[in-house]
Image: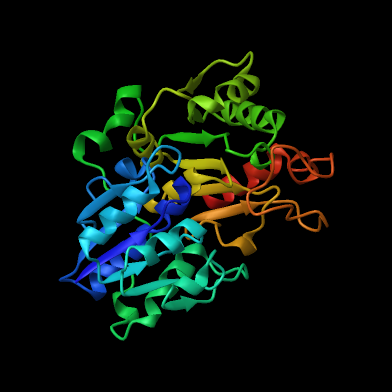
Amino acid sequence: MKIVVWQTAFLGDLILTTPLFRSIKNLFPESKLTAITKPFGNDVLKNNPHIDKLIIYDKKKDSNLQLIKELRSERFDIAISPHRSHRASYSLFLSKIPFRVGFDRAGFSFLYTKTVPHRFDGTHEIDRNLSLLKVFKEYDESKIQRFPEIFLNKEEDSYYKKLGLKSKSYILIAPGSKWKTKRWTAEGFSDLIDTLLKKGEKVVIFGGPEDTDFTQDIIKGKSGIINIVGRTSLRESFSLVKHAKALISNDSAPVHMAVSFNTPVVDIYGPTITDFGFYPYRNGIIVEVKGLKCRPCGLHGHNKCPTGTFECMEKISAEMVLSALYKLL
């Protein structure tokens, strides 16, 4: 049996799909499993024993028609799509895969042969994804895997040592986010780091090149911090997250990296809410300002606060985040 899973959403979404891959293999051990992902799938799914083949699809560069032709030639028996895009729906349909499972709120959901309810009602994204498997007669709750997984080889796992770090001896901070309103304030991060340093904690900051300017605003005038923003690969970042004493992050992909390694994580929420289902699945605490009528203002946040107040983040203090951190530890 040949099964294909379409997940071309964001980095965090792919990490949260890894329990689905393992669960499919548990239910169908003789199947050949193919995953369709964005280019970062090469890093997220490297060494994953449950993936037999990886198809990289970059919608900004690659031909959708060519992808459909490739899927047709593979002659898949089953397609499963946790991604709710129109493109996923019609591509899998045009690929002539006989059994196709997706969510009822996906674009062009009528093109699936079976649909499963999708609701933002507090159900975690992992559990939503796994619900796609309940349409199969082979479904067995005892064979379902519910924690995300990232597999590092020995060399990758030890990357943190190259920075002179010891395992579980440092607080890792991820200040960035693709959407500006999902970032806690520079002042908040700055005050937090000052307090952590006074308490004798070793502080490491990481993120992508796009987080460089924001990070500079945070650490201006500070010393004693290890700043590797924009200087690590994704696989190296995984090592840092795995061996951190704890991670402090906005509602973004690093949170799901931490959950994969069971690293304690403080997750800072602004424009988004836990009802969306992307909160830490284990070993995490949410910091948020409750009772604001403007929350949520969108599924992903915005580049500018719709109300012009940015209350959801401005009202979060360093003391709130620090309290959550030490409660977790």
Determine whether, in the image, residue 272 is placed left or right of residue 108. right
Q: Is residue 137 above or below residue 277?
A: below
Q: For this rendering, which residue is in front, 265 or 307?
A: 307
Q: For this rendering, which residue is in front, 192 or 184?
A: 184
Determine whether, in the image, residue 170 is placed left or right of residue 216. left
In the rendered image, residue 166, in percent from the top left (x then y), is placed at: 34, 31
Q: Measuring 44% from the left and 67% from the top, which residue is drawn there? A: 129
Q: Quadrant of the N terminus?
A: bottom left
Q: For this rendering, which residue is in front, 82 or 163?
A: 82
In the rendered image, residue 12, in percent from the top left (x then y), is placed at: 47, 49
Q: Is residue 255 above or below residue 16?
A: above
Q: Measuring 55% from the left and 57% from the top, which residue is drawn there? A: 278
Snapshot quadrant of residue 59: top left
Q: Is residue 311 visible?
A: yes
Q: Is residue 145 visible?
A: no
Determine whether, in the image, residue 219 is placed left or right of residue 169. right
